[in-house]
Amino acid sequence: MDLQDLDRTEQLALVALIEFVGAAEPETSEEEEAEISRAIEVVGEDTWDELVAEVDARFHDLDGLKVFLETILRPEARALIFEAVLEAGLADGRALRNAGILDWLSAAWGVEIEIPTEDED
């Protein structure tokens, strides 16, 4: 499964998480921008913009986002979204300021956080 295989609701979850995690960072690195640009390219710029507008209109707080994220049911989509958000957030090697949402998401979706160490590369 790839990002282009996500349905509209799953795409919304992807964009919401990237927006939420990205908003916690004071600045975005070139590596993070490259990962986000890849997601935008796959989804399509117009669709991405529509999804960002929907995120802004629907999710005013973390609790509302969490309720929505629990509606994402396909295990493959959950794993793919989680991986994409994690890659975007860790693209430059810095720790995420908003790692708490990923801890919660990992538990809620049953997705394990796997960060390779230098020994595993």
Image: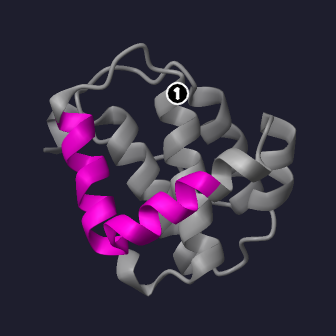
Residue shown at the point (70%, 61%) measured from the top left: 109
**Helix, strand or loop for the magenta stretch, by majority:** helix
Asked whether 58 or 32 is in front, the reply is 58
Asked which secondary structure carries label 1, the reply is helix
- 86 or 44: nearer the viewer: 44
- Type of amino acid at the residue the image marks with label 1: Ala
Q: Quadrant of residue 47?
A: bottom left
The reply, left or right, for residue 13 in relation to residue 107 is left
**Where 101 falls versus 113 (above or below)?**
above
* Residue 35 versus residue 73 in the image, above or below: above
Residue 35 x/y as whole percent: 25, 49
Residue name at image x 53 percent, y 34 percent: 21
- Residue range in magenta is 31-53
Where residue 83 sits, quadrant-wise, is bottom left
> What residue did someone put label 1 on?
23
In the image shown, does 49 or 118 lie closer to the viewer? Answer: 49
Q: Please indicate whether residue 114 sits to the left or right of residue 8 in the image.
A: left
Decide if residue 2 is in sight here: no
